[in-house]
Amino acid sequence: MQFGIFTVGDVATDPHTGRTPTEHERIKAMVALARKAEEVGLDVFATGEHHNRPFVPSSPTTLLGHIAARTERIILSTSTTLITTNDPVKIAEDYAMLQHLADGRVDLMMGRGNTGPVYPWFGKDIRDGINLAIENYALLRRLWREDVVNWEGKFRTPLQGFTSTPRPLDGVPPFVWHGSIRSPEIAEQAAYYGDGFFHNNIFWPADHTKRMVDLYRQRYAHYGHGTPEQAIVGLGGQVYMRHDSQDAVREFRPVFDHSPVMGGGISMEEYMRQTPLTVGTPEQVVEKTLGFREYAGDYQRQLFLVDGGGIPLKTALEQIDLLGEEVVPVLREEFAKNRPAGVPDAPTHATLLAAREAERAGTDEPAV
């Protein structure tokens, strides 16, 4: 099972000090978080994609390419790649290039984003959101898997004899997760292709997450990719930890209260009861996270948000230290217990390449 962190890259005011970092400081902080995640033994660093303030990660491949040059092992992912408003040709080429630079340590999480105005900014209509996601991803898959593509669709100019460059590393495209919080059509899309489904459930109750994951698992089996238990599932979470739970609550409450998403409604305690948010000790984070399996089944990837809402870099790095030293080792051991043998690990470039070579050996197809 893979464990890691994700960031949305928001530039927010620290509610304790009133200080707001500059965009430069926030971008550099994201690099520091990724390097710390690798240092403490986490498996994945993921960044969102946004094109509006207060967010800064408008160019994930630039950020991840820089991080690739400063790390050796950690998988570099997106927590959203906007499949709706980005040109699938540009996605195919940008992420293949990143895949080469990172020696295969790359995967993507496709999503529609959460900002309506981004559609007209990139010449699209938000009412076409689902159809854009479906058509653009169908083209992206072909661009990565076919050397010459002839294509015509509704939302972009046709392609005639087009070859996307560079080709994917070793002829193996990056693994794709489809990220969605509320759209069953995206769970269906992930199931249809046999891709991963990432339910970033940080703002939603467990019963909603269960419905979405169950739908994906059932449709994954329907399309003949394996049993429901073999479907590839990822979950999000948000944590704030101190060794004294009262310290954690005291420090995080202003972050919660000032949050444009979490604050202003129910209490933090009720919010924690309903959602994956955990504010407390490392032991409480372990207990809460292990409970995700009760409604999502045995899954493959768990990512935590540790840096949003104005949390300063020093504090976010402390959270990653606690994850690496006291949380993730226990989670690895506990999640491995009673895990059925047929439940696969999350795909990586190495495992996808090995599966491709095994398939070719079985059909006597010459290797590239």
Image (tube, rainbow, N blue to C red):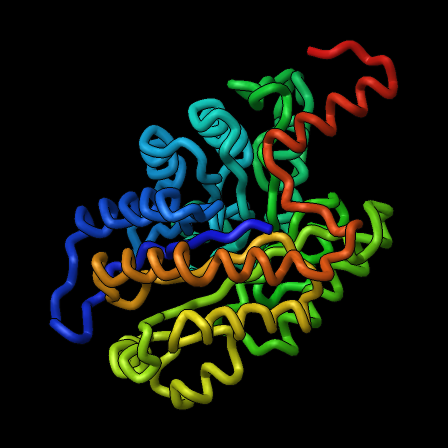
Q: Is residue 283 visible?
A: yes
User: Which image quadrant for residue 83?
Assistant: top right
Left or right: residue 115 compared with residue 345 = left
Q: For residue 179, which quarter of the picture?
A: bottom right
Q: Which of the pair 175/163 is nearer the observer? A: 175
* Image coordinates for residue 59, horizontal then vertical, percent: 36, 40
Q: Where does the image place residue 333, in percent across and percent down from the top left?
A: 58, 58
Q: Nearer the viewer, residue 131 or 359?
A: 359
295 and 309: which one is in front?
A: 295
Write the residue at 86% across / 54% down.
222
Residue 114 visible, this orientation: no
Does residue 161 sit above or below 23 in this rendering?
above
Residue at (29, 43) in percent of width and height:
31
Q: Position of residue 96 (x, y in %)?
A: 51, 27
Q: Is residue 288 left or right of residue 60?
A: right
Q: Position of residue 52 (x, y in %)?
A: 32, 55
